[in-house]
Amino acid sequence: MIKLIARGLAVDGDGKVLSVKHIGKGYWCLPGGRVEDGEEIAAAMKREMIEELGVEPEIGRLLYVHQLFVDDGKTQRVEFVFEIKNPQDYAQTDLTKTSHGLAELEDVAWLDLTDKTHIFLPEFIKNYAANPSNFTELHIDR
């Protein structure tokens, strides 16, 4: 089975990354979710962010593609991470004003990626968050 996942990377002026913690999961991740059959990847990321956070993202560049295997290798996941150009609009998210936020998310926060106890992300994402203007190319990791 192959699952396509679309995520948004929003970085504030201090290098903190918008992150979500799903109910029942013990980790933080970038907002976004599964691409539905027949759906364009960027459209899926936009839909997921509106459903979960109630704010329409301004989608920038495709920054990162990551392939991984889960469920003892039975499921292949391909994650696409897009730049969010309006991070300031996510400064105050209210899950009560979303269609899916309260049902899916335990918490939303801006996390400092130097604190490794909060979120585990590939080095590319950490480096991008530290200095977004330095990156001009798509990074692919497998």
Image (cartoon, rainbow, N blue to C red):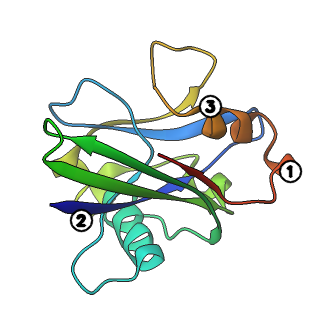
Compared with 63, 116 (above or below) is above
x%, y% of residue 8?
51, 56
Task: Check disc 2 and report the residue beneath it.
Answer: 99
Q: Nearer the viewer, mark 3 or mark 1?
A: 3
Q: Are marks 3 and 1 in contact (CB under 8 Å)?
A: no
Q: Which residue has dot 1 on it?
A: 133
Residue beneath label 3, please?
123
Q: Where residue 90 appears, x then y in whole percent?
A: 55, 52
Q: Earlier in the sequence, mark 3 or mark 1?
A: 3
Residue placed at 21% from the left, 30% from the top? 25
**Residue 89 appears left or right of 43:** right
Q: Quadrant of residue 114?
A: top right
Q: Secondary structure at mark 3?
A: helix
Q: Earlier in the sequence, mark 2 or mark 1?
A: 2
Would you identify the image quadrant in which residue 72 lies? top left
* Amino acid on which the number 3 mark rests in the picture: Glu
At 72% from the left edge and 42% from the top edge, which residue is drawn?
Answer: 128
Tell me which label, 2 or 3, sits earlier in the chain.
Answer: 2
Question: Which SS class for mark 1?
Answer: helix
Category of crowding for the residue at label 2, using alpha-carbon neighbours closer than 10 angstroms: few (below 14), some (14–19), many (at least 20): some
Left or right relative to 87: residue 25: left
Of badges 2 and 3, nearer the viewer stands 3
Q: Residue at x 32, y 27 (%)?
A: 27
Q: So how many labels did they put on this image?
A: 3
| Percent of width and height locating residue 5 | 34, 59
What is the CA distance from the residue labelled 2 to the residue labelled 1? 33 Å
Q: Secondary structure at mark 2?
A: loop
Q: Percent position (x, y) of residue 131? A: 82, 39
- Left or right, 58 with respect to 42, comes to right
Q: CA distance from mark 2 to mark 3?
A: 32 Å
Amino acid bearing label 2: Ser
The front one of 92 and 51 is 51
